[in-house]
Amino acid sequence: MASQLDRILDPEYLGDLRARPMPDVRTMRSECQEVETGLSYLRRLVQGRLDIVGVELQRRRDGGAPGELSSLIAELPEILADRIRAPGVGRLPQLMAPGEIEPELEQRLEAIVGGHDVESLPSLSDDELNALHDELEQFERDVSDHRRALFDRIDALQAEITRRYRTGEASVESLLQ
């Protein structure tokens, strides 16, 4: 069974928007926004993990020995506060709740981080830490690619709604009915 994200990212999802009733177009836009909110939340989780692993790698490159858990824990507030303004398109979320994460993506994140919590990072070898960093980085790129594809769909749906209001096919009064 295809996930909601797979269904939305299917090239046939939008179909002929002009032929769809306005309530369907609005529902599709809302569905895309809800899925994007979940992906945005997942991306922030991945970036946080990636930042923590990156700091441990940098600490080692700067001469810090593996196994200094107290040092890593002491840096967590600074590490996690570093992304006050995340890179990206800078859109305000339509929904403020974190959103549901697609189960397949959540499972993929869990498979990557597995038993690698903050406590275990200093005990990983440099090779294991680099591999974890690379996997997290690739996963973050994949999630970002999905978000961009969702934004393309949201933009197409919004453009169709705007077009209908501009041409008079839809009116504000119809929202009140």
Image (cartoon, helix red, strand yellow):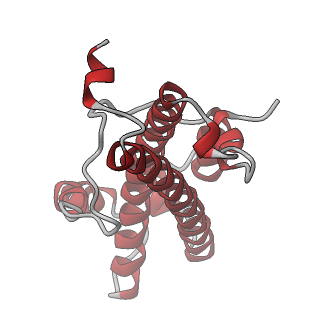
Q: Nearer the viewer, residue 98 or 46?
A: 98
The answer to whether 79 appears left or right of 126 in the picture is left
Quadrant of image for the C terminus: top left
| Residue 84 placement: quadrant | bottom left
Q: Is residue 114 visible?
A: no
Which residue is farthest front? 168
Residue at horizontal 53 percent and vertical 34 percent from the top: 28
Whole-percent x, y for residue 23 in the image: 48, 25
In this figure, what is the number of numbered marks?
0
User: In this view of the protein, which residue sits in the foreground, 59 or 98?
Assistant: 98
Residue at the spot 63% in from the left edge and 70% down from the top edge: 131
Q: Determine whether 38 is above or below 12 in the image.
A: above
* Residue farthest toward the top in the current orientation of the protein: 177
Picture quarter with the N terminus: top right
The foreground one among 102 and 133 is 102
Which residue is at 41% across, 51% downward? 163
In the rendered image, the residue lying farthest to the bottom is 62
Please give left or right for residue 101 compared with residue 71 in the image: right
| Image quarter of residue 65 | bottom left
Can residue 1 be seen in this snapshot? yes
Instruction: Answer with left or right where residue 78 lies relative to residue 91.
Output: left
Q: Residue 77: x and y, percent?
A: 17, 54
Q: Position of residue 111 (x, y in %)?
A: 67, 46
Outermost residue to the right: 1
Residue drawn at x 33%, y 49% is 166
